[in-house]
Amino acid sequence: MRMIVDHISYTYKENKKPTIQDVSFEIKEKEILTIIGQTGSGKSTLIQQMNGLLRPDTGTIYYHGKDVFDKDYHLRDLRSKVGLVFQYPEYQLFESDVFSDVCFGPKNQGMSKKQAELKAFAALRMVGVPEELFYVSPFELSGGQKRRVAIAGVLAMEPEILILDEPAAGLDPQGRKELLSMLVKLKEEKNMSIVLVSHSMDDVAEYAERVMVLRDGKIAYLDTPKNVFSHKEELEAMGLSVPQITHLMYSVRAAGGMVDVNCHTIAEAKEAILKLYGRG
Amino acid sequence: MLRDITLGQYYQTNSLLHRLDPRVKIMGTLVYIISLFLFRNLFVYLVVLGCLVSMIKLSKVPFSFMVRGLQPVMMILFLTVICNLLFTKGTVVYSVWLITITREGIELAFYMTVRFIMLIIGSTLMTLTTTPTQLTDGLESVLSPLNKIKVPVHEVAMMMSIALRFIPILMEEADKIMKAQLSRGADFETGNIFHRVKGMLPILVPLFISAFKRADDLAMAMDARCYRGGEGRSKMRPLIYKNVDRRAYMVMIIYLIIIVAVGVFV
């Protein structure tokens, strides 16, 4: 158990209604946890608490058993272990070249220049930025490349938990796929725990081990994708949906094909349809 | 963090002052400021004070909001009072070592303070009862005679309203960037002044870049909608004087007459 979120609630000053209400869960080692929920359900607020940027009104967060909002705990230590990649992270780039921008994080952690550069090099490699781009200005890059550099900037700090707020938003299908498989690789090779806020049910079904569904600041479901997506009606009532392929299976069923509608990935659907023909 | 700062002083309520045409309020504030500086006479100030208090009552804005407008200028006010007290020549009333305080000095400092405080409260009252948009619309209309001498009044007013419109957006953006850099271990609070200024760079650079980008986008969007400046441009909500506004102008004239009368004869 890397992180335990213990009954946190949070209300923004300008609002009356709490944005987060009594939320508890834990983040396990080496897992991909996705958070889904309608706009305004509290996803972004929740992940900012996990990074110590917002302090919950009640409840607390434990990181490796230590209360991170304790007076003796330095939030900077937490932030270097829990990396947070905001939505559209490209706006955080500021250095004159890509490489020094990625060095910013590790340098803040107190590493020597040499160490920081090694980390930056590895991180840029990891996200697939070609070496000839290392010394150009980040503002000359394309949108997708900027995104990679920004993510590398967080990865270079070698976090144990990596939280990403819709990292694939605005990327082309190819870039999207590359990014998501990179996250799987990070989990497998670096033992990272990945927390992914996503609007794509297809991605959730394909990559997540657990799904958290937020509704009005409360956890509506926290389970495997298979179990969560079996609540089709409830999800749709929340303004969410099920993966495309599940919709397809429902159509097949409606057209008279007796398939199991509870399929959420293309592989599962393929099995189910083949089974239908195997019988027929 | 940055989001906690409220901008624009407008206080939402429904009062006579809120309903007035912004042009009336701008002219009224101008008349008020002139009246403050016309005479240096205690009775005039009592009249002005009476008017100010009744205006505040009319506006239904809590008095604490007026005082809030005073806070940022308190330091300047304090310094002017000290300077006036120390460096005005005249009949000495008190003297110790290098410090001499004169009758004229006290008088000057007193009037200075009264004028200053009343000036600030009066103009605060205007911004509290007028939305920024109304204010720029009003200014544009009041200053429109300057068009004759080739002052681009509409353009200036447009720039003002765009600037006002973008302040909250840029604040939010700054907040976002600040948080992103904090998560990357940035430190804005410790170290000496040079260190801190350098620490602001990771916020300022992206903020400027995004401001420029937004400006570009907005210019493009305005172009796409065939914006070509103020000439021949009509308004969705044109400013039209109502009866209340005419009466308010009358009140202003009467006020000015009373002030002059009191100033000259009392």
Image: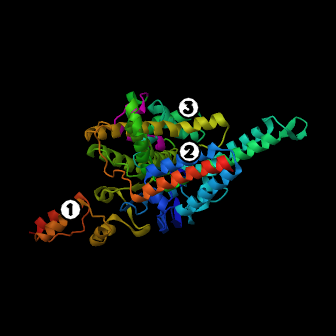
Q: What colour scheme governs how the chains and residues are painted in the rendered image of this protein? A: rainbow
Return the chain for callout 2: B
Q: Residues within 10 Å of mark 3 (few under 14, many from 20)?
A: few
Splitting the image into 4 quarters, where does residue B150 fall?
top left
Residue A135 rendering spot, x and y as whole percentages: 43, 27
Q: Indicate the secondary structure of the residue bearing disc 3.
A: helix
Residue on which disc 2 sits: B185
A227 or B56, which lies in front?
B56
Mark number for residue A269?
Answer: 1
Q: Answer yes or no: do the residues labelled 1 and 3 have beta carbons within 8 Å? A: no
A148 or B114, which lies in front?
B114
The magenta region covers: A135-155
The residue drawn where x is 31% and y is 48% is B235
The residue drawn where x is 28% and y is 68% is A236
Return the chain for callout 3: A
Q: Earlier in the sequence, mark 1 or mark 3?
A: 3
**The residue under label 2 is which amino acid type?**
Gly
B132 or A30, which lies in front?
B132
A141 or B22, which lies in front?
B22
Q: Residues within 10 Å of mark 1 (few under 14, many from 20)?
A: many
**The residue under label 3 is which amino acid type?**
Lys
Question: Can residue A241 be seen at all in this image of the molecule?
Answer: yes
Looking at the rendered structure, whether the residues under marks 2 and 1 are on a common chain is answered as no
Q: Is residue B248 left or right of residue B66?
A: left
**The residue under label 1 is which amino acid type?**
Ala
Splitting the image into 4 quarters, where does residue B219 fall?
top left
Mark number for residue A114?
Answer: 3
The CA distance from mark 2 to mark 1 is 45 Å
